[in-house]
Image (cartoon, rainbow, N blue to C red):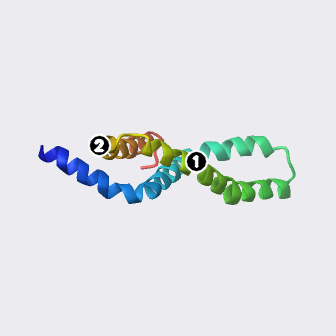
Amino acid sequence: MFILDLNLRLAHFLQPHLQDVALALVATCLVIYGDRINGYLKRLVSSWIFIARIAAFILMCTFGYGLLTLWTQPLVYWGITQVDLMYRPVLVLACFCLLGILAERKRHL
């Protein structure tokens, strides 16, 4: 009973911070997989002239990642809120553990 009560208190504590948690999940995913996005962009613009390649990289880093974050954070937030309150702390912990494992496999840690 103590564990269930502690879990419920943690769920209520997390409730006002879920948008920040969703943003942290999205940002972590972009850090882990940003090299793939940059590699795709590099292949896409490799035949362009130097100035155009630089401009494409700047636009992708400034606006591309920003838009990806703005568009996916509400989706992740919505997904978290669809989970029952009792399971949210476990879900958040599991997501961050999974991202940690993925980062370790990609040698980011």
Residue 103 visible to an observer of this rendering = no
Which residue occupies the foreground of this view, 79 or 68? 79
Q: Callout 2, which amino acid?
A: Met
Residue under label 1, please give it: 72
Look at discs 1 and 2 and give the one toward the viewer: 2
Name the element at disc 2. Answer: helix
Which residue occupies the foreground of this view, 3 or 41? 3
In the rendered image, the residue lying farthest to the right is 49
Q: Residue at x 39, y 46 (%)?
A: 96
Callout 2: 10 Å neighbours few (<14), some, many (20+)? Answer: some
Q: Residue at x 31, y 41 (%)?
A: 87
Callout 1: 10 Å neighbours few (<14), some, many (20+)? Answer: some
Q: Quadrant of the N terminus?
A: top left
* Numbered label attached to residue 86: 2
Left or right position of 75 against 104 = right
Residue 52 visible to an observer of this rendering = yes
Q: Callout 1, which amino acid?
A: Thr
Residue 67, compared with residue 102, is above or below; it is: below
Residue 20, compared with residue 107, is above or below; it is: below
**Residue 7, position in %: x, y?**
23, 48
Find out whether the residues at labels 1 and 2 contact each other: C-beta distance under 8 Å.
Answer: no
C-alpha gap between disc 1 and disc 2 = 24 Å
